[in-house]
Image: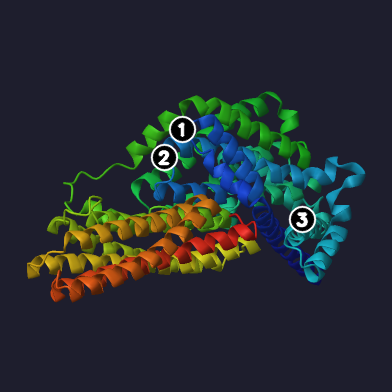
């Protein structure tokens, strides 16, 4: 009895190490990929073929098609990707998940280079490097090694714990039942995968059993088909609370895998009816990897031309609500984070990249406000409609600051590289500067409004001075925001130079204003508002300078997301 309990504990412990090893290895791979993951995002175009390749590559890196699909749901919900793009990436994700299966089966086909043999050594070397090395690139690679080692030690523990049961009639009977009932086999694979939320892990478990000669061909094939359906549960759960387009992305994933399982379910049932002797023979781990790859690649090739049909079917399942348009839809949309979604947190490198986009969007809202109230001609004063729009948008900026800050807090708690940590810290500072710049723009709008109400008008000389100063302040802020968007040190330097011009202009403008007061060429009431606007423009350029210097600091350290 104690022996059986000990074997159960060993299997559970081995499974835990296997799952944890996969997680650590995927985390290390993501960190090491860094900017490459960012570049992959750039390939997500309307070209579905490129989408398939990107989906396969990303899944191969993060070792989970479930995580990739959850991320895709997040991208669709954030408006970064449309359903046509998502369909291709989802198809590719299924191909990418076969990498783990081949890694697990390497114990059979790798000969003297069996991962199980040198896994403890790899784990030990990785642990020593993480403990004693301060070089980031080296520790990232060591993290991959540690995950790899733990993964295969876990596999070995699982395999050894069930070794004594390989001739057990209980296992034989169980897999015979699953093999004889395709629906039950598919259902078993789907349920197990849904519980552990990783098809890579569930296939790995099946392969471990196959290494001990416990699994027959028929049951393994149907369980594998079910595993592809079970992996959809993660994306479906993730889409709860998302918009309808994101829900459709999850449905496309489900439709694709269900159709593939149905097609192969019929084919393999006929096949095993003809080759009945093969059906009950033991299958190897490598043969499972081979079938898993053939299945996912062939289904992708078969259904690839029908991607648009899958998109239409998802629209029939998740229908649009028929409702009258709300007049405030535009403002409500502005209040929403367009580029950020909790699902994107599944992959830190993408999360950081999209946080940058959202901060840039916030910056452009402030720039838009500044353009509304400071006319290029320097003569025509802004209308009340434009001033009101500035006040409305400032509320959006304040709201975005709170939301982005909360999101950055979540990102900072992820497994980030040293470079990503610096970028996130700078984004925290940048949104504070952008929000404060927005406050100063609002203050200028209030001054403009009060000038109108008081009936006082600025002198032509004062208007000319404001035009020149506002032009430099706007340039500084625009260049600073662009430098964040593009990671461009040259733009950041130009923003710093414009800030210096604004400082010089402010000193000269104050001297000129004092002269006008002394000669009584302008009214004291005008002077109060005028100096307030000048002060706000100078403060806007100061915040632009701060933002630009964050980018310069990142470039000095050769930092990229």
Bin the neighbour count of mark 2 within 10 Å (Cα to Cα): few under 14, some 14-19, many 20 and up.
some
Q: Is residue 380 above or below residue 135?
A: above
Which tag, 2 or 3, sits closer to the chain's start?
A: 2
| Whole-percent x, y for residue 119 in the image | 84, 56
Which mark is drawn over residue 82? 2
Q: As displayed, is residue 477 above or below residue 212?
A: below
Give the camera-side residue of 449 and 517.
Answer: 517
List the residue tagged with mark 3.
148
Q: Nearer the viewer, residue 555 or 519?
A: 519
**527 left or right of 93 in image:** left
Query: Disc 3 on helix, strand or loop?
Result: helix
- Name, please, the residue furthest toward the front: 519
Q: How far separated are the C-alphas under marks 1 and 3?
A: 35 Å
* Quadrant assignment, res 176: top right
Q: Are marks 1 and 2 in contact (CB under 8 Å)?
A: yes
Residue at the outermost right position:
112
Label of residue 46 in the image: 1
- SS class, disc 1: loop
Q: Could you classify mark 1 by the number of other residues whose Cα lies within 10 Å: few (under 14), some (14-19), or many (20 or more)? A: some
**Residue 233 seen:** no
Q: Marks 2 and 3: which is nearer the front?
A: 2
Residue at horizontal 16 percent and vertical 51 percent from the top: 327
Label located before the other in sequence (1 or 3): 1
Q: Which corner quadrant holds the N terminus?
A: bottom right
Residue 440 in the figure: left or right of residue 4: left
Instruction: Please give left or right for residue 507 compared with residue 298 in the image.
Output: left
């Amino acid at each position: 009895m104690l022996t059986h309990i000990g074997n159960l504990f060993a299997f559970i412990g081995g499974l835990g190490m296997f799952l944890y090893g996969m997680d650590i290895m995927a985390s290390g791979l993501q960190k090491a990929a860094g900017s490459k993951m960012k570049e992959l995002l750039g390939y997500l175009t309307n070209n579905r073929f490129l989408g398939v390749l990107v989906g396969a590559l990303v899944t191969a890196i993060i070792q989970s098609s479930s995580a990739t699909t959850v991320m895709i749901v997040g991208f669709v919900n954030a408006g970064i990707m449309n359903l046509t793009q998502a369909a291709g990436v989802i198809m590719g994700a299924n191909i990418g998940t076969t990498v783990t299966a081949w890694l697990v089966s390497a114990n059979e086909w790798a000969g003297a280079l069996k991962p199980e043999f040198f896994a403890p050594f790899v784990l030990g070397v990785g642990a020593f490097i993480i403990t004693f090395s301060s070089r980031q690139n080296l520790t990232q690679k060591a993290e991959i090694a540690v995950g790899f080692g733990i993964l295969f030690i876990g596999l070995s523990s699982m395999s050894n714990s069930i070794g004594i049961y390989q001739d057990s009639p209980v296992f034989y009977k169980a897999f015979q039942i699953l093999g004889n009932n395709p629906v039950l086999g598919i259902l078993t694979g789907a349920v197990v995968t849904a519980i552990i939320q990783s098809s890579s892990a569930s296939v790995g478990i099946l392969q471990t059993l196959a290494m001990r000669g416990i699994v027959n061909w028929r049951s393994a094939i149907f369980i594998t088909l079910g595993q592809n359906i079970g992996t959809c549960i993660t994306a479906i759960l993730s889409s709860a609370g998302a918009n309808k387009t994101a829900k459709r992305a999850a449905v496309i994933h489900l439709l694709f895998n269900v159709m593939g399982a149905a097609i192969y379910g019929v084919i393999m049932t006929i096949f095993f009816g003809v080759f009945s002797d093969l059906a009950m023979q033991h299958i190897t781990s490598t043969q499972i990897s081979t079938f898993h790859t053939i299945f996912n690649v062939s289904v992708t090739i078969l259904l690839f031309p029908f991607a648009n049909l899958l998109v239409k079917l998802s629209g029939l399942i998740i229908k649009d609500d028929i409702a009258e348009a709300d007049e405030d839809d535009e403002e409500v949309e502005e209040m929403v984070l367009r580029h950020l979604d909790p699902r994107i947190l599944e992959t830190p490198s993408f999360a950081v990249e999209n946080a940058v986009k959202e901060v840039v969007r916030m910056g452009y809202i402030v720039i838009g406000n500044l353009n509304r109230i400071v006319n290029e001609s320097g003569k025509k004063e802004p209308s009340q409609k434009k001033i009101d729009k500035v006040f409305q948008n400032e509320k959006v900026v304040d709201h975005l600051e709170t939301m982005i800050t909360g999101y950055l807090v979540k990102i900072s708690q992820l497994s980030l590289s040293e470079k990503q940590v610096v970028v996130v810290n700078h984004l925290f500072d940048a949104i504070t500067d952008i929000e404060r710049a927005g406050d100063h723009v609002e203050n200028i709008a209030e001054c403009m409004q009060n000038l109108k109400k008081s009936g006082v008008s600025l002198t032509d000389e004062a208007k000319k001075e404001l035009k020149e100063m506002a032009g430099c302040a706007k340039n500084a802020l625009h260049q600073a925001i662009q430098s964040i968007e593009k990671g461009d040190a040259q733009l950041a330097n130009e923003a710093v130079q414009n800030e210096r011009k604004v400082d010089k202009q402010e000193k000269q403008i104050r001297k000129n204003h004092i002269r006008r007061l002394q000669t009584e060429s302008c009214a004291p009431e005008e002077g109060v508002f005028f100096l307030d606007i000048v002060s706000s423009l100078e403060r806007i350029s100061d915040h632009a300078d701060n933002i630009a210097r964050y980018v310069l600091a990142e470039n000095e350290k050769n930092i990229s997301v």
